[in-house]
């Protein structure tokens, strides 16, 4: 995220990350493309790690381009984890 954020504020237009950050249509297209490639890799049992890394990278850039902080996403996931834990504890009591 540090590198992505640095590229966001950089004037380095030749950077692929910077290009994605400044072209939201390209960014969303790459997320969709990379998800498709990951699904295909899983189905064929080839290059899964490589394709998963591509998905995560492009998703992180897409989030940052749209001012969605990964820290906020992680916080939301932690809230959900706590909520699931609370529901499990509650259900075990009854």
Image: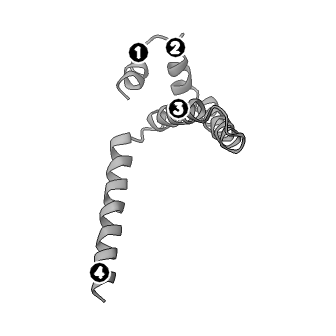
Q: Secondary structure at mark 2?
A: loop
Q: Which quarter of the picture shows residue 35? A: top right
Residue at the extreme front of the image, as rendered: 45
Query: Label 4, on which residue?
Result: 90
Say the numbered circle drawn on residue 53: 3
Q: Is residue 75 above or below residue 35?
A: below
- Colour theme: one colour
Q: Is residue 49 left or right of residue 78?
A: right
Given residues 69 and 54, the one toward you in this image is 54
Q: Give the residue displayed 38% in from the left and 25% down from the top.
A: 5
For the C terminus, give its image quadrant.
Answer: bottom left
Q: How many angstroms separate mark 4 from mark 2 (CA)?
A: 51 Å
Q: How many angstroms separate mark 3 from mark 2 (CA)?
A: 18 Å
Q: Secondary structure at mark 1?
A: loop
Q: Is residue 33 left or right of residue 52?
A: right
User: How many marks are shown on the rendered structure?
Assistant: 4
Q: Earlier in the sequence, mark 2 or mark 1?
A: 1
Query: Label 1, on which residue?
Result: 10
Q: Is residue 33 left or right of residue 58?
A: right
């Amino acid at each position: 995220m540090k590198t992505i954020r640095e590229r966001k504020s950089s004037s380095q237009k030749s950077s692929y990350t910077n290009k994605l950050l400044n072209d939201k249509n390209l960014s969303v297209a790459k997320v969709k493309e990379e998800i498709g490639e990951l699904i295909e890799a899983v189905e064929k049992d080839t290059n899964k790690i490589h394709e998963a890394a591509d998905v995560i990278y492009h998703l992180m850039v897409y989030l940052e381009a749209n001012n969605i902080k990964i820290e906020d996403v992680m916080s939301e996931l932690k809230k959900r984890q706590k909520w699931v834990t609370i529901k499990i504890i509650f259900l075990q009591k009854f």
